[in-house]
Image (cartoon, grey):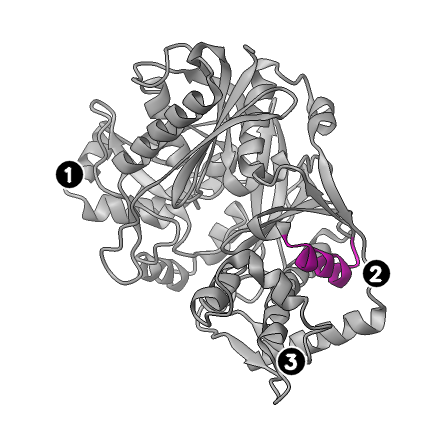
Amino acid sequence: MSDIIMAIDQGTTGTTVLLLDPALNVLAKGYQEFRQIYPKPGWVEHDLNDIWASVESSVTQALKHANVKPGQIKAIGITNQRETTCAWNRNTGEPYNHAIVWQCRRTADECKRLREAQLESLYTKRTGLLLDPYLAGTKFKWLLDNVDGLRSDAESGKAAFGTIDSFMVWRLTGGVHVTDVSNASRTLLFNLETMNWDDDLLEPLTVPKQVLAEIVDSSAVYGETKGLSFLPDGIPVAGMAGDQQAALFGQACFEPGTAKCTYGTGSFVLLNIGDHVIHSRHRLLTTVGWRIGGETVYALEGSCFIAGAAVQWMRDGLSAFKESPMIEALAESVPDNGGVVFVPALTGLGAPHWNPDAKGVVWGITRGTTMGHIARATLEAIALQNHEIIQAMQSDYRKPVQMLKVDGGAAANNLMVQFQADILGTEISRPTMLETTALGAAFLAGLAVGTWKDKDELRKVWKEDRRFTPHMSKDKVDEHLRLWDEGIKRV
């Protein structure tokens, strides 16, 4: 038992740690939540010391539950909440400020300034991203402009900046400052073609290049643990990727044309587009999936703001049921949606619409409408949103999506996943292990240290739980899509 991989999944609300053997048996799991800080409306922050305490607690829990000695760990892989931005002192390791979370909207005016300066086309062409406050670049500028002493420390080389992956590696290794290509590609500062920081992108945001991390592959040994109270020195830190890219890798979507959808609070669809950049004509994002051995894989990404959160709204806002999994039985209490359509624009519409001012709507209600119909319409809405994204992806990619793999909490809902297969007309594969972000981190770390020798071995250990095959008639599919389009117009 000396070939154990530790995966640290540092998420938005908590940190999960998994211990896995080479056959992907989960030996133990640790989890610890941490504070969410809301200093002003629309602002979201995290205390880096809270995050680090959650990592220490989760690692300790996992080791205790598995009765595993730290010396048995062969490597550590990291996956992280993307775009959350932080700065710390290179000498002391102490943060200068709370981290600015990806959800935070404080830099909306900065994004507007860049657009008014006619810079959006430059940023989109070079980064594959849109000018939006959730990306890291404008957060870096906010920290430099608003934290006392930080700009002078940044210019003199005393400060280090990064996303959470960089902070994690720094703390684990006692001072290695790196970021992988997948996380770098979410900053607005990274050029997809040159695969490096871009001076033309740094200059408008006044970010000095010396504060940024060295850009590295997603699977490589970056350093070894050093000076920690909860892990011995010498364990390789050997793989990392942003959470959605890690899920794409953890789902073994290694071939161009394969895609995954993670159903969480929102839903995130990523399509492997191979080794060439494709710029979306439908306002999807182009991002780096991973780079291994110097070979880069790119992805198209589309996200919906509300997926599982629509179920939570039915549970908490409408008191329709006590626990989220109960929605499936409620939806199955009726044969169909009874003509009810729900567009869950509860926090605006994401891709491909990008309308932050949109409001949700439930329409088609009659005297015969029951909570069962609304429940069914809610599950269908999660899938119908993804249909729009995947249609846009197929148009940009100019080829059909070969296979959609699903994960995340709502992927356990058979009714919803079957409807997703029906509405897409595409087979859907659900794995036995739904925590694919952590699995992707483990895969990347294990490849770097030889636990698995190549992607073929990863394909063999990845296990499918169930395959969903479309069986709805074309007329019914067309009717669902027609009603959805009507709902979108009303929104």
Mark closer to the chain start, 3 or 2: 2
Q: Which residue is mark 1?
A: 149
Which residue type does callout 1 highlight? Gly
Q: Earlier in the sequence, mark 1 or mark 3?
A: 1
Query: In front here: 61 or 56?
Result: 61
State the quadrant of the C terminus.
Answer: bottom right
Q: Is residue 422 magenta?
A: yes
Rendered location of residue 95, percent (x, y): 23, 34
Q: Nearer the viewer, mark 2 or mark 1?
A: 2
Q: Position of residue 137 (x, y in %)?
A: 38, 46
Residue drawn at point x = 63 percent, y = 63 percent? 329
Residue behind mark 3: 486
In the image, the segment drawn in magenta is 413-426
Screen quadrant of the N terminus: top right
Q: Amino acid at mark 2?
A: His
Q: Report the residue at 65% width, 37% height from top.
A: 251
Residue 177 seen by the camera: no
| Helix, strand or loop for the magenta stretch, by majority | helix
In three-dimensional space, the C-alpha distance between marks 1 and 3, rounded to whole angstroms, equals: 53 Å
Residue at the spot x=69%, y=79% of the render? 338
Is residue 3 or residue 44 the one in the foreground? Answer: 3
Q: Which mark is residue 471?
A: 2
